[in-house]
Amino acid sequence: MKRFAAILLALVLLASSVPALAAGSGGGDKLVAITFDDGPGPYTEALLDALKTRGVQATFFVLGSRVERYGRLVERMYGEGHQIANHTYSHKALKGLSDAAVTEQITSTAQIISAAAGKELRCVVRPPYGSYNARVLELLGAPGIFWSIDPEDWKYRNADTVFDHIVSKVRDGDIILLHDIHPTSVDAAVKVVDKLLADGYTFVTVNELFRRKGVPMEDGVMYFSCRNATVRGALTAPAMTYEIGGDGCFITLASADDAPIYYTTDGSDPLYKGKLYSSPVKTYGDCTVRAVAAFELNGSRSPVMTQELAVSPAAPAITAVGTRVTITGEGRLFYTLDGKRPTINSNRYTGAFTAAPGTLIRAVAIGEGNMISAETRETLLGAGALVRDAEAGDWYYGAVEKTVTGKLMFLTDKQYFKPDVAMTRASVLETLYRMAGSPPVSGAAASALFADVSDNASYAGAVRWAYQNGICTGEGGRFHPSGYVTREELAAFLYRLARVGGQDVSAAADLRAFADADTVDAYAAAPLAFAVAKGLMNGEEGSELRPHAYATRAQVAVIVTRYMALYNK
Ligand code: ZN
């Protein structure tokens, strides 16, 4: 029984400690705003690190002249949820300035802050030295923020003195004044944060303090603290619902706190890129909705909501028999043959049609509410073959057409040619064997020639043919069928193939024209010189042969096509 009670107690302690940890800035209902004037400066970064570790948000009354030097830190403050506020450009006592000079001190700094934060921010203002009167207040154009706890950190420059002053005076709703241009003040701030978090305080920005206390802030009014009872909790992330109508899907966003909502539909950050939500947002297909509830986008914001909207029909399928093209899919199908992106205004698909080889076919399905699918794009190669990853403008397109329709090379089940993929020895020799017309092979079985080739392998015939004609040799009784073929190896295969076919292979280009000529292996020197002289290969990336790079499928297709043209195959 005693043991059971102990477990229960442990559970209760665990449960009560979780919200405090999750809230980051303390789980208590006593609120306090810690503020830093006259920065940013050399100690601000360390302060930001300490606040980040503790999940605490503060308010920074920055000077325009300092932001010009430390703008990077202002961007960081904004990104980490701190409030950025205006402490004028050059820290002059505003009472002593003309109207125009007061306005200039405030507006220039507001612009500098927005530029540094990367976002148009509305900033509260704290007049330097607390110097203000009715005239200054009217010129602020924003709420004025004073303080209720002043440890005179600039005077004492002693972390313990500053700490003792603050913790002995602080009450719920206070605004603490510090200066992040003194290392002693930064040390004191970190100690104060740890102490007050332990005492059940929650640190909030100035804007958030007034929002949670239910006190509206008005332009031209000076506020000292906010000691009313707590009436509101933290901002919650917006909620999303959607409905598919006759034309479009309508996304509705709502804030439980009646806060303005900023959103994006392209997955980007709504704090930086968001549009202000006013009425349901129309979309025609799958998208990523991200939204944040925020007051002034400055120091008072919710977590970001991210939701994937999956409303589009599946992308259609395109098939062909000869040059007759069929499109299948859900809903209404639309397509283009002119390379343009298909829309609801494109050709409506009503039945199979004929297209010329080389035509790019782009198609979409449009479902309920005009939801549009992802696009399917295929190029008709002719002979009923369609390819997804080779189009008429590609340098290897003609070679893909020749080798695929000529059945020397093949597409995957999903109709990809995979131009950038390397080829194995087995598949390159199969291609060359087919090019040679797949002649009957007699003599020793493949397995008798090479320990690593099975007689049942699809490429066994090609390997026997290649061996018997001296096109490949193997190494130590092994063929290495799955080894990749380098560019110099490919040149050697073609050189030997031409020689076996009775062609004159004496042509030889001077390989010293290529920067990497000295990396060519001895066996491949004559084949590469022949391949370059005959225009089968012409070096890569300007002046390099790259003999040890793997030959890609696109390169093999192009080189084999050139070989066939050279010898009228
Ligand atoms: Zn100041």
Image (tube, helix red, strand yellow):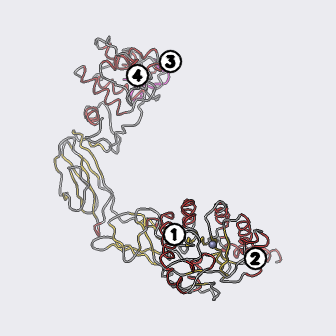
Q: Quadrant of the C terminus?
A: top left
Badge 3 residue CB within 8 Å of ligand 1: no
Q: Quadrant of ligand 1?
A: bottom right
- The residue wearing badge 2 is 8
Query: How far is mark 4 from mark 3, CA to CA?
Result: 34 Å
Amino acid on which disc 2 is placed: Leu
Q: Is residue 455 magenta?
A: yes
Q: Position of residue 554 (x, y in %)?
A: 34, 34
Q: Identify the residue position indicated by label 4 in the image.
A: 514
Mark 1 / mark 3, whichever is N-terminal: 1
Sequence order check, earlier mark of 4 and 3: 3
Residue designated by label 1: 109
Q: Is residue 78 left or right of residue 560?
A: right
430 magenta-colored:
no
Quick check: 353 left or right of 405?
left
Quarter of the image for the N terminus: give it: bottom right
Examine the rendered structure and indicate whether residue 554 appears above or below residue 119: above
Q: Amino acid at mark 1?
A: Thr
Give amino acid for label 3: Gly
Does the closest atom of ligand 1 sit within 8 Å of the Cβ of label 1?
no
SS of the residue under disc 2: helix
Q: CA distance from mark 4 to mark 1?
A: 59 Å
Q: Which residues are magenta?
A: 448-462
